[in-house]
Image: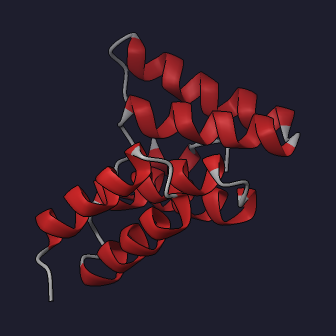
Amino acid sequence: MQDLAELMDDASGELAIGELESAAAKYRLATQLAPDHFPAWHALGMCLMRNGDLKGALGAALMATDLAPNDLLAWTSLSQIHVKMGNIPEAEAAKGNARILSLGGRVNRDAAPGQ
């Protein structure tokens, strides 16, 4: 079995050449191997969004924000997914969290909107 770093590299390579289903399968495996690995959840969400699986992308993005509530990219990605789903209030809330982080603030996880 591949180690996590190798699996992530392989998935990223698949993503780069447009093999979205194969990349998503590898990112999913990475999340199973390391359920608390933020990069795997974030990459899975972005891959699923590109592949049109918005519900799956949303779940992965929410997990990413749970794991790294003060990661600017996680909130920006969550906002993008909500926009694609037509969830504008949720998209704006996630964008607001990204804005707070971009200004050097922190997200209060207990009161984090956008989910």
Q: In this view, does 89 lie above or below 65?
A: above
Residue nearer the viewer, 65 or 32:
32
Residue nearer the viewer, 52 or 84:
52
Residue nearer the viewer, 113 or 110:
113
Residue nearer the viewer, 6 or 34:
6
- Identified at 65% across, 57% down, the residue is 58
> Where is residue 5 drawn, in percent x and y?
13, 63
- Identified at 34% across, 83% down, the residue is 32
Picture quadrant where residue 14 is located: bottom left
Q: In this view, does 72 lie above or below 104?
A: below
Residue at the far right: name it.
86
> Where is residue 71 drawn, in percent x and y?
36, 36
For the N terminus, the image quarter is bottom left
- Identified at 40% across, 15% down, the residue is 102
Residue at the far front: name it.
17
- Identified at 42% across, 32% down, the residue is 73
Q: Which colour scheme is used?
A: secondary structure
Q: In this view, does 93 lie above or below 69?
A: above
Inspect this view and state whether residue 107 appears. Answer: no
Is 43 placed left or right of 99 in the picture?
Answer: left
Q: Is residue 100 above or below residue 44?
A: above
Inspect this view and state whether residue 103 appears. Answer: yes
> Where is residue 72 drawn, in percent x and y?
40, 29
